[in-house]
Amino acid sequence: MNIRIDTHVHTFASGHAYSTFAEYLDIAKKKGIEMFAVTDHGPEMPGASHIYHLANQKEIPSEIDGIEILKGVEANIMSIEGDIDIPVRILKKLDLVIGSLHPPCIRPMSRDDNTLTLINAIKSGNVDIIGHSGNNAYEIHQYEFVRAAKEYGVAVEINSGSFIGNRKGSWDNCVSIARIAKELGTYVTTGSDAHIHYRLGDFEKIYKIFDTVGFPIELVITESKDKLKNFLKQRR
Ligand SMILES: [Zn+2]
Ligand SMILES: [Zn+2]
């Protein structure tokens, strides 16, 4: 398997990431990455840039040297109502919005409440992708979550950053989420969650999950640029 689209990348502007946009572009060329989404953290993440940084991404061309760039954000889901830290007027300017749970912004709750939070974010229409739902810091009812994503046309991210650092132990969750997505026909996306450019498109662990569950490529929205663009077009 060789997926050349990465929907989850952090630059220096996220506050705890280490590479510039130019470095990502450079390594994308070297690695044969065709498209990637810049998804710096929303402003409620400690150390994240001001909202103007996200809003001003029109400065970034949509294509440079044949590599297509999506302007996005990894928004913080802030409450059980599923609201996020980006106003709608700014969401409208972006190509792609990931919504994720992060401990500085929303503390882990009961399994029922964590699930309700994600489902409310899905229902809000404000997020295209739910990020790293396999994170074992937030227990969820996986089946209900993946079913809601299917129902509302939101993609579930399989996140290769989940297997390093503080989300270690998420492997079994990611496998079972992928298994449920296969069963229900829910779209998934591939995100490296790179916080340094070397990790762009680093999907080996994701391929292993896909192999483990026999995941159908038809449900992977990052299979091709057109497929991802069509998915996003239908969302907007
Ligand atoms: Zn995240
Ligand atoms: Zn991230």
Image (cartoon, rainbow, N blue to C red):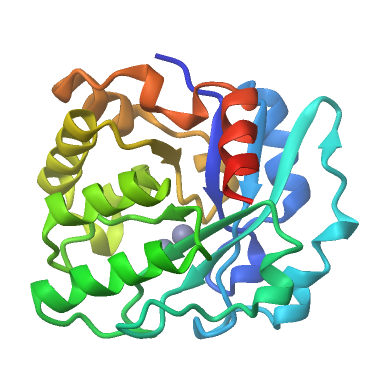
Q: In this view, does 4 lie above or below 170?
A: above
Left or right: residue 215 versus residue 196 is left
The residue shown at (25%, 25%) is: 210
For the image, the number of numbered tags is: 0
Which residue in the rendered view is the most extreme toward the front? 151
- Residue 55: percent from left, percent from top: 77, 71
Task: Please name the residue shown 83% across and 35% down the image.
Answer: 63
| Nearer to us in this view, 138 or 186 | 186
Above or below, 215 against 205 in this view is: above
Name the foreground residue: 71 vs 193.
71
Q: Nearer the viewer, residue 33 or 30?
A: 33
Please report the residue visible at 57 percent of the width from the left and 75 percent of the height from the top.
42
Provide residue 137's location: percent of width, then percent of height. Answer: 18, 69
- For image coordinates 39% across by 51% down, the residue present is 152
Q: Can you say whether 217 is above or below 54 in the image?
A: above
Write down the quadrant of residue 11 in the picture: bottom right
Q: In which quarter of the image is the N terminus?
A: top left
Q: Can residue 169 be seen in this view?
A: no
- Percent x, y for residue 176? 12, 40
Residue 116 appears anywhere in the view: yes
Q: Where is residue 144 in the image (x, y as percent from the top left)?
A: 16, 55
Which of the 4 quarters of the picture holds residue 189?
top left
